[in-house]
């Protein structure tokens, strides 16, 4: 096997904790991941002509030409195109596909986003997904989604609740969730939100329906989030727009031994995790609440954590990636 460079996008570990974990796993190969800016350095260009292989690992790259409101930005589109073809000429592209389409995408640009995604796929030597079901249906390569680092933070004090966490956005279906949420069971929705109108709508609906629900529109620190998840009955994934293949929130829950309730049937099938994930319906809400009350849920915590740690271990993910790197650097 020849020596190789790993160029990783997005290299900013603050962009998403997922990137921190994948870069930690890839680093086991002995090659430290670099950002896209490294390709402009003279030693990188010279290395391309010396036989040193370049592996470009791209995540969410199809979203790059679009702004946060889902509109195309011409300069970013030019950069996207140049980088994609540079990577194709001077290296091998590994594309980790996370979504079927971009969240909050402006409908006017949906066809163009599909074009960008297909362009990335067409120029990739390997396409990875974190769902065995999606990989089998599309002839992609499956690797497990990594679990997240935990900090052994004590559980948040107080009564238990069902939990929604992360960015509070319309596409996640919170309004629809409150429409059918049963009054008897406590619900906490927490996370940062830039949509003040959405927060007002949620609070109004909670008041109108007299729900035992709270909206906490603030970004929690990693320690606060871990403590909050540890005190929940289950994590709720209420979105129904079928944009994501799997959900990072589910794997953060699995990392801590928490169960998840999923509304979207496709997401439920893609996760394919019946021991940790159930359908979001009134019967499962009632059953888990009662299990929490009688201690059954807590008693099974360590078994769930052990199961997740084995199934989604770093070593399995690393082996899946390094086997493909070896294949393309012979």
Image (spheres, helix red, strand yellow):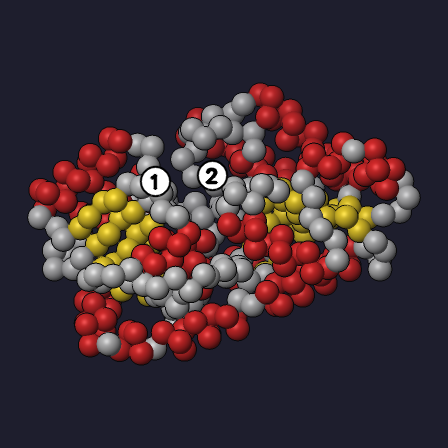
Q: Quadrant of residue 75?
A: top right
Q: Where 248 sits versus 45, above or below?
A: below
User: Residue 32 placed where, x, y %?
Assistant: 71, 51
Under circle 1, the secondary element is loop
The crowd level at tag 2 (other Cα within 10 Å; few <14, some 14-19, many 20+) is many
Query: Which residue occupies the extreme top position in the image?
Result: 74
Q: Where 63 sits versus 159, above or below?
A: above
- Image quadrant holding the C terminus, namely bottom right
3D distance between C-alphas at marks 2 and 1: 19 Å
* Disc sitting over residue 81 in the figure: none
Q: Residue at x 84, y 60 (%)?
A: 1
Q: Could you tell whether 248 is left or right of 158 in the image?
A: right
Q: Residue at x 35, y 43 (%)?
A: 219
* Disc sitting over residue 192 in the figure: 1
User: Residue 216 placed where, x, y %?
Assistant: 25, 44
Residue 168 makes an appearance in the image: no
Q: Where 300 sits versus 262, above or below?
A: below
The crowd level at tag 1 (other Cα within 10 Å; few <14, some 14-19, many 20+) is some
Under circle 2, the secondary element is loop
Q: Nearer the viewer, mark 2 or mark 1?
A: 1
Number of numbered labels in the structure image: 2
Query: Which residue occupies the extreme right position in the image?
Result: 50
Q: Earlier in the sequence, mark 2 or mark 1?
A: 2
Q: Could you tell whether 121 is left or right of 160 in the image?
A: right
Between 252 and 82, the one nearer to me in the picture: 252
* Disc sitting over residue 102 in the figure: 2
User: Residue 207 placed where, x, y %?
Assistant: 10, 43
Q: Could you tell whether 31 is left or right of 11 in the image?
A: right
Q: Residue at x 59, y 50 (%)?
A: 96
Residue 294 makes an appearance in the image: yes
Between 253 and 241, the one nearer to me in the picture: 253
Are discs 2 and 1 less than 8 Å apart at CB?
no
């Amino acid at each position: 096997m020849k020596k190789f460079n790993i160029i990783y996008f997005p290299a900013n570990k603050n962009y998403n904790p997922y990137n921190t974990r994948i870069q930690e796993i890839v680093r086991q190969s002995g090659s430290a991941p670099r950002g896209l800016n490294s390709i402009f350095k003279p030693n990188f260009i010279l290395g391309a002509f010396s036989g040193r292989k370049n592996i470009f690992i791209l995540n969410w790259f199809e979203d790059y030409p679009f702004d946060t409101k889902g509109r195309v930005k011409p300069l970013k589109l030019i950069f996207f195109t140049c980088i994609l073809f540079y990577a194709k000429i001077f290296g091998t592209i590994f594309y980790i596909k996370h979504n079927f389409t971009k969240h909050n995408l402006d409908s006017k640009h949906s066809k163009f986003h599909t074009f960008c995604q297909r362009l990335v796929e067409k120029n990739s030597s390997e396409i990875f997904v974190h769902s065995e079901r999606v990989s089998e249906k599309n002839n992609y390569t499956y690797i497990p989604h990594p679990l997240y680092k935990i900090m052994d933070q004590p559980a948040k004090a107080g009564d238990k609740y069902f939990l929604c966490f992360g960015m509070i956005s319309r596409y996640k279906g919170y309004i629809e969730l409150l429409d059918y949420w049963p009054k008897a069971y406590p619900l906490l929705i927490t996370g940062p939100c830039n949509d003040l109108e959405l927060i007002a709508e949620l609070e109004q609906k909670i008041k109108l329906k007299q729900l035992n629900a709270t909206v906490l529109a603030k970004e929690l620190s990693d320690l606060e989030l871990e403590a909050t998840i540890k005190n929940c009955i289950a994590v709720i994934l209420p979105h129904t727009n079928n944009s994501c293949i799997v959900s990072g929130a589910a794997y953060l829950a699995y990392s801590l031994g928490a169960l998840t309730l999923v509304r979207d049937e496709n997401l439920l099938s893609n996760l394919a995790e019946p021991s940790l994930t159930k359908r979001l319906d009134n019967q499962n809400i009632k059953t888990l609440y009662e299990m929490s009350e009688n201690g059954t849920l807590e008693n099974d915590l360590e078994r769930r954590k052990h199961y997740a740690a084995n199934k989604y271990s770093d070593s399995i993910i690393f082996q899946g990636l390094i086997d493909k790197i070896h294949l393309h650097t012979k």
